[in-house]
Image (cartoon, rainbow, N blue to C red):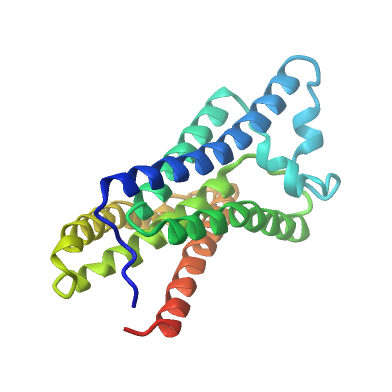
Amino acid sequence: MKKETSADPKQLYERLEYGFTIVFMAFLSVVTLSVMVYVANDYGFSTLNEILAVSRRTPWGIITSLFVHADEKHLLSNMIALFVFFLLLLGSNVFHSEKELKHRILTTLPLIICLPVVLNLLFIIYFPELKLIGSSSIIYTLEGRCIGYSLINSLELRKVRKSVQKERRVLLASSLSNLIVFASFFPNVLLYPLLSPSTDLQLIVWIHSSAFSGGFLTVVFYALRRQFKEPE
């Protein structure tokens, strides 16, 4: 298998610059749409949140609801979480080649929109009397991708002894840092469904868990397919 890590500081900087540009533009797009909707709802169109929410009466909400937030706290917490996980996506994969980094980021971006749209569609089919807003499903899909990549990257630790001296330190740093990320986040994900006493909250937890699982499993399937296609 061709080595994917690189110890060249110049190449590392170029990958960081390239990757950050992409994830920041994606983040900025979500923030801009969310802030525009929030400001419009707060200063002139007080029913806009209702119109853009996902429900049986507003089916376009399967897309528009992803950029609707109830209040400033809801908006701020979602945007902070989104930014953190975008940075984590970049940081977890920056030691890979530019081609691999590009693939992992660019396949993540459409998924974090498409999967929440599918979940919203299922929501209005099975719960036509309820409404839903927020970017949480985008965030949980992105988190699932981040934790999935952290897992498969941490498994590269087994290759440290076989790697050449030049690549060994980079591979070790990448594997250990990803292992720390996985160990820090995954237990919280497992405990999250237990903290849902009410029925409405259980529904939200189901949506969040489905988004996370979808993001995580797509990474696992990708890793398995690559393993079969590129045996050591």
Image coordinates of residue 123 in percent, x first then y, are 71, 56
Image coordinates of residue 129 in percent, x first then y, are 78, 49
Q: Is residue 35 above or below residue 10?
A: above
Image coordinates of residue 188 in percent, x first then y, are 35, 52
* Residue at the (57%, 29%) spot, across then down: 75
Q: From the viewer's perspective, tell me whether residue 163 is left or right of residue 2.
A: left
Outermost residue on the right side: it is: 57
Tell me, yes or no, if residue 54 can be seen here. no
Q: From the viewer's perspective, tell me whether residue 155 is left or right of residue 146.
A: left
* Residue at the (74%, 61%) spot, across then down: 126
Q: How many callouts does the rendering have? A: 0
In depth, the one of 166 and 192 nearer the eye is 166
In depth, the one of 171 and 49 nearer the eye is 171
Q: Quadrant of the C terminus?
A: bottom left
Q: Quadrant of the N terminus?
A: bottom left
Image coordinates of residue 11 in percent, x first then y, are 34, 49
* Residue at the (74%, 46%) spot, across then down: 63
Q: From the viewer's perspective, tell me whether residue 22 is left or right of residue 177.
A: right
Q: In which image quadrant can residue 127 be found?
A: bottom right
Tell me, yes or no, if residue 199 can be seen here. yes
* Residue at the (21%, 67%) spot, across then down: 157
